[in-house]
Image (spheres, rainbow, N blue to C red):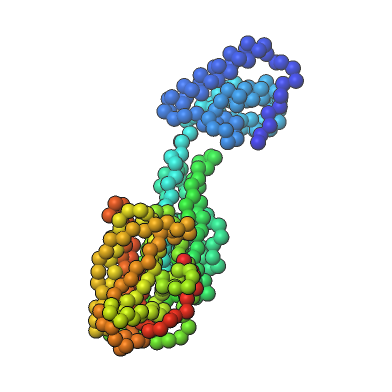
């Protein structure tokens, strides 16, 4: 910060100094009113508007030899102190040029879901502030970039980079001092498997559909890596997941996982699944639509009302449900089936859905790794 040299001896009577201070304040205020803008700070720090203490420092420098810059900013002079006219002109100039920054509002997609090998270009939207706006981010994945001028986040993730990411993004403006705001870019990058038909937009991410059941897609091989969900604010972070573990954990299903058929002598065949969800009202009635079909048969297509309760984990709303299968036959062993659920909160309008291609199996199954 520029330093003002204090008076070693009082150069003018205190009353004169105070009078001059009042005149400076009145002149600065008049200049501000003339421009219809607030007075900008006059001491080159981050304290805000010009205050009496700031002008008192400038007045002290006015009656002292000036060897350094005086605030408000004045032309440097090494031999003579600035005149009162210089001081008042500087204050007026600062007042006239003061454009208060509007707050910056910055947003990013709640969660952007995409696949490894698919290029994304996500614009971070920002409004307000004093141009130009500048964008920055911390902890960018290898190969990713954030354009500091346009705010576009670009990346083509490799298969090894399939994971979830929460990237802090900051936006600052050209004011002095700058105004800033932050948001979080949430990404979920998963491998692209043979049962997913993607529809992708570089700015919005990908959605997927399952191929027709007449086209088997689970031809064997190692299961794809399991990627946990990204937690985002509600309602944008709403999600429902299907699990099937028996012994412990949740066991979220993904394409080509096995699903057990449980045979009963009189009730036929049943499947049991777990649901976990975020951003849905606990203790209230929710609408659940569920559907299971194989190539030739629609086994269940039903609509139920359920009540979920919190369980104290990240995805804290969970329920177990059983779905009857119409055809109790061993011919279902090894068949591919589409399992889909849709959960709706009629009180908030929040909706989330999930569909997976599963392989139906008789007999006990080992638990799936518990990855949310």
Where does residue 326 sit, x and y in percent of width and height?
25, 79
Q: Is residue 351 left or right of residue 84?
A: left
The residue shown at (28%, 79%) is 266
Left or right: where 54 falls relative to 10: left
Residue beneath the point at 72% across and 21% down = 7
Q: Nearer the viewer, residue 74 or 103?
A: 103
300 shown above or below 318: below
Task: Out of 28 and 322, give the one closest to the viewer.
Answer: 322
Q: Position of residue 158 (x, y in %)?
A: 50, 74
Which picture quadrant has residue 273? Answer: bottom left
Residue at 60% from the left image edge and 35% from the top image edge:
45
Q: Is residue 246 in sight in this rendering?
A: yes
**Number of marks drawn:** 0
Residue 321 at what x, y percent from top left?
A: 34, 68
**Residue 202 in view (yes/no):** no
Quadrant for the N terminus in the image: top right
Of all residues shown, which one is farthest toward the right? 8
The image position of residue 284, as x and y in percent, is 32, 53
């Amino acid at each position: 910060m520029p330093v003002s040299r204090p008076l070693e001896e009082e150069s003018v009577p205190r009353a004169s100094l105070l009078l001059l201070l009042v005149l400076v304040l009145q002149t600065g205020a008049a200049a501000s009113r003339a421009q219809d803008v607030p007075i900008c700070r006059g001491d080159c720090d981050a304290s805000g508007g010009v205050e009496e203490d700031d002008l008192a420092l400038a007045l002290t420098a006015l009656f002292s030899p000036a060897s350094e810059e005086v605030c408000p900013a004045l032309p440097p002079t090494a031999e003579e102190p600035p005149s009162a006219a210089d001081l008042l002109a500087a204050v007026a100039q600062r007042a006239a040029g003061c454009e208060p920054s509007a707050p910056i509002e910055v947003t990013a997609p709640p969660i952007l879901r995409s696949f490894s090998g698919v290029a994304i270009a996500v614009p971070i939207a920002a409004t307000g502030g004093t141009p130009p706006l500048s964008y920055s981010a911390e902890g960018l994945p290898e190969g990713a970039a954030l354009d500091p001028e346009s705010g576009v986040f670009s990346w083509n993730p490799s298969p090894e980079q399939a994971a979830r990411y929460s990237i802090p993004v900051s936006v600052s403006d050209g004011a002095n001092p700058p105004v800033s705001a932050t948001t979080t870019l949430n990404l979920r990058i998963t491998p692209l498997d043979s049962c997913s038909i993607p529809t992708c937009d570089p700015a919005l991410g990908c959605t997927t559909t399952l191929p027709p059941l007449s086209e088997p897609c689970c031809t064997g091989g190692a299961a794809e890596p399991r990627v946990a969900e990204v937690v985002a604010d509600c309602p944008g972070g709403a999600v429902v997941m299907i699990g099937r573990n028996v012994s412990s954990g949740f066991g979220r299903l993904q394409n080509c996982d096995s699903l057990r058929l449980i045979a009963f002598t009189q009730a036929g065949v049943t499947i049991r699944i777990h649901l976990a969800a975020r951003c849905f009202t606990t203790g209230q009635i929710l609408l659940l639509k569920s559907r299971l079909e194989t190539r030739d048969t629609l086994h269940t297509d039903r609509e139920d009302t359920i009540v979920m309760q919190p369980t104290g984990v990240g995805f804290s709303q969970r329920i177990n449900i059983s779905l009857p299968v119409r055809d109790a036959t061993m011919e279902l062993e090894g068949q591919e089936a589409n399992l889909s659920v849709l959960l709706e909160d009629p009180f908030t309008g929040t909706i989330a859905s999930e569909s997976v291609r599963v392989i139906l199996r008789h007999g006990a199954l080992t638990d799936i790794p518990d990855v949310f």
